[in-house]
Image: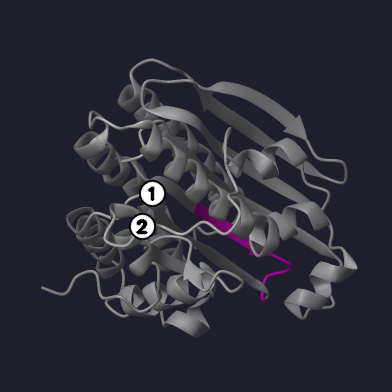
Amino acid sequence: MTTTKETIAADYSGIQDGICQGLEALDGVSVFEEEVWQRDGGGGGRTRIIQQGDLIERGGVNFSAVHGRLPEPVKKAFGVDEENFFATGVSIVLHPRNPFVPIIHMNIRYFELNDTVRWFGGGIDLTPHYIEQDDARFFHQSLKDVCDRSNAAFYPEFKAHADKYFFIPHRQETRGIGGIFYDRLTPEKTGESWDRIFDFSRHVGEAFVPIYSELANRNRNRVFTPENERWQQLRRGRYVEFNLVYDAGTKFGLETNGRIESILMSLPPLAQWAYNFEAPKGSPEADTLALLKPGIDWLAE
């Protein structure tokens, strides 16, 4: 079996390297700044931030491998009694300059308490400021292809999980068009071996740059107006609301004494909150709002 915590962390570290190289080539102007950090209590990571590029206004690609004592709130949330934990993963959020290029988030992670209590989690989701049906179809088809490579049951299950997870109850809208989201994958849950689940996790990470490169290059040179930028900042505000109120990764990082700057790198450089904003009927903004709901089959003809 190759799925030891050491080999998983090493592979995730390599995936971070490959993604950063791919994004620097895609942006063409800016490069990542790296900060290596240590966690009080055990472990550490590498925070990499790219800013003020041609494509990316701000983005982060983080790797961490941390261990130590599991805080009581996390033990209660996970329903476990174990004291010591190990967690490793790669987490990405990109906020583009052009409002017609979508925000994207990816996370692949592994959590372990002991030889019998451990699991993989993660996923990719897309938050367009303006929803383009062809882009949504490409995105979801690409994720289905990644899932089908491992297990044909994964995409419908993980797509439904993403629709449910990335929902903002107080707004009654989804954060974006979803994607795939999975948690606590084990051989017992999936019928796949640990090695096969690990392969799937790697495939998700390796798919990130090709998928985002296609979406970015389709839209990065589109002309936009100040009104488009204002809408972009309003949609970023919704993104912030979800991450600060509902995101499980944010809560886990804060409750396990994680590095604050790395945890909050998901926040955009600029966002807006307008009082009682209503998109004009028939506008592209209203069309996007109408599609921010769970259960849409983006692959339907």
Q: Residue 280 carries which label?
A: 2
Give the image location of residue 294, x and y in percent.
Answer: 40, 76
Quadrant position of residue 139:
bottom left
Give the image location of residue 72, x and y in percent.
Answer: 89, 69
Q: Is residue 162 above or below residue 21?
A: below
Q: Name the residue under label 1.
A: 129
Q: Which mark is residue 92?
A: none
Residue placed most toward the observer, 297 or 31: 297
Name which residue type carries label 2: Pro
Which segment is the magenta one? 107-116
Q: Is residue 108 above or below residue 269?
A: below
- Helix or strand or loop: what does disc 1 sit on? loop
Residue 73 belongs to the span the image colors magenta: no
The local crowd at label 2, few if under 14, some if 14 to 19, many if 20 or more residues have their Cα within 10 Å, is: few
Give the image location of residue 12, x and y in percent.
Answer: 51, 45
| Pointer 2 with pointer 1, Cβ within 8 A | no
